[in-house]
Image: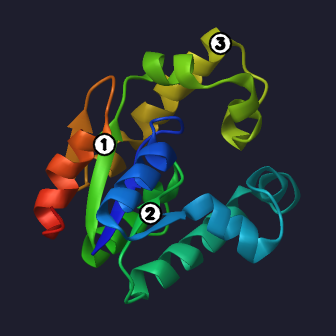
């Protein structure tokens, strides 16, 4: 079974994805790390040198390869992944999609300055501007995120919440 976690940057996709994959004894994939490995550049460097359109095409290509794989895994997507190149429909066809719907104010509190420097769309923002940008991104992306097969909307999503959705749906539990 393929499980795709989607949501805003800082919603917990990577942290929870690792926990879920460990619990289900399947592979964990961080889509951004897979892209960095393929391209030999960080996400920030890709945005700076080759621009967002190039990044989004590579992102879609890497996602497509995972969707076509016969392997079971949990994928933590990038926050914008569902919004480009029909990626949301691709993920829905390939496996289970789960939207981690964490309020923008909670995400802004979570993101440390170090984490923000690794996120090209959130660089150099004050705490207030960060919260505003996250709310703006949420507004822009929500119609895509709502296409997920499952949604968990709360401030503090834990492994038990994901297992209640993913485990039940996959037969792993």
Q: How is the image coloured?
A: rainbow
Q: Is residue 32 left or right of residue 88?
A: right
* Viewer-closest of 25 and 71: 25
Q: Residue furthest right?
A: 49
**Distance of label 3 from label 1 (alpha carbons):** 28 Å
User: Residue at horizontal 73%, vertical 65%?
Assistant: 36
Q: Is residue 115 left or right of residue 64?
A: right
Judging by the rendered image, the residue that carries numbered circle 1 is 159
Whichever of labels 3 and 1 marks the residue nearer the N terminus, that label is 3
Residue 76 point in image, percent of width and height: 47, 56
Q: Residue furthest top?
A: 128
Q: Is residue 62 left or right of residue 117?
A: left
Q: Are marks 3 and 2 in contact (CB under 8 Å)?
A: no
Judging by the rendered image, the residue that carries numbered circle 3 is 127
Q: In front: mark 1 or mark 2? A: 1
Judging by the rendered image, the residue that carries numbered circle 2 is 75
Residue 125 point in image, percent of width and height: 73, 20
**Distance of label 3 from label 2 (alpha carbons):** 28 Å
In which quadrant will I find the C terminus? bottom left
């Amino acid at each position: 079974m393929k499980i795709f976690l989607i949501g805003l940057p800082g919603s917990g996709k990577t942290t929870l994805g690792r926990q879920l994959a460990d619990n289900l004894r399947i592979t964990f994939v961080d889509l951004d790390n897979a892209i960095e490995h393929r391209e030999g550049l960080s996400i920030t460097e890709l945005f700076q040198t080759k621009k967002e359109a190039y990044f989004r095409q590579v992102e879609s290509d890497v996602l497509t390869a995972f969707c076509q794989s016969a392997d079971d895994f949990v994928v933590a997507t990038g926050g914008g992944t569902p919004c480009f190149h029909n990626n949301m429909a691709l993920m829905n066809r390939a496996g289970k999609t789960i939207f981690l719907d964490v309020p923008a104010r909670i995400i802004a509190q979570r993101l440390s300055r170090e984490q923000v420097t690794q996120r090209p769309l959130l660089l150099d923002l004050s705490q207030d501007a960060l919260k505003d940008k996250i709310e703006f991104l949420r507004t822009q992306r929500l119609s895509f995120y709502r296409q997920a097969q499952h949604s968990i909307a709360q401030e503090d999503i834990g492994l038990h919440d994901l297992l209640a959705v993913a485990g039940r749906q996959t037969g792993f539990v």
